[in-house]
Image: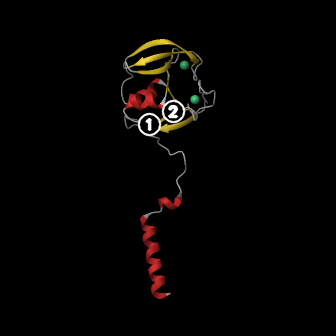
Amino acid sequence: MGVRTLTCPYCVKPMETFKALARDKGPPIELDRCRQCERVWFDVPEIERAVGKQYLSRLEGIASPHKCPACGSAMSETLVNGEITVEQCTGCKGALVDPAELKTLSGGPLVEAVPPVPPRRKLYKSSESDYGDIINELIHSLFG
Ligand SMILES: [Zn+2]
Ligand SMILES: [Zn+2]
């Protein structure tokens, strides 16, 4: 993991890896996401950790027109919990999940462990240095 680059079967664009917080409070999970359609690819252990449940009972449905981005096997549209359709690989059992389905599965959106944009320093200045600046300003205004 981390070396492979998956291709989104919908958009035929390279997917990017990102880290999400696990519901089981363990270390962040590395997942693959399509920038264009925001679908997320899960290996089976990953989806269980992200959703915080055992991978739910499912009914294998009709064949999907897409191939698995991880192993190239056929995928099928699989009904999870009787209400959510995900595309699951018949080979490696990984699943492609769109953002709305994911929210329904886990009861909330995925929370990224690492923000995609580096924080701007000024917004994260410590209160101590703010305090120092105020003191400096005060001294300056009093004693010139
Ligand atoms: Zn896509
Ligand atoms: Zn597969």
Q: Quadrant of the N terminus?
A: top right
Q: Is residue 20 above or below residue 91?
A: below
Residue 28 location (% of width, % of height):
45, 38
Residue 82 appears left or right of 96: left
Q: Which residue is mark 1?
A: 110
Say which mark, if any, is on residue 13: none
The quarter holding residue 134 reads bottom left
Quadrant for ligand 1 reads top right
Circle 1 SS class: loop
View extreme (bottom): residue: 143
Q: Residue at (47%, 78%) from the top-left corner?
A: 137
Answer above or below: position of 14 versus 73: below
In this rendering, the answer to whether 127 lies above or below 138 is above
Task: Describe the element under mark 2 as helix, strand or loop.
Answer: strand
| Residue located at (48% from left, 62% from top) | 125
- Mark 2 or mark 1, which has the lower sequence index? 2
Q: Position of residue 129 (x, y in %)?
A: 46, 68
Q: Are marks 2 and 1 in contact (CB under 8 Å)?
A: yes
User: Which is more toward the observer, 23 or 79?
Assistant: 79
**Residue kind at label 2, given as amino acid type:** Leu
Query: Which residue is pictured at 45% across the width and 73% down the height?
Result: 132
Amino acid at the residue labelled 1: Leu
- Marks counted in the figure total 2
Asked if the beta carbon under badge 1 is closer than 8 A to the nearest atom of ligand 1, the reply is no
Residue nearest the viewer, comparing 82 with 75: 82
Give the labeled residue for mark 2. 31
Q: Ligand 1: does it lie within 8 Å of the C-beta at label 2? A: no
Percent from the top left, x then y, of residue 94? 50, 22
Name the side, left or right, on which 123 lies relative to 6: left
Residue 87, image x and y in percent? 50, 20
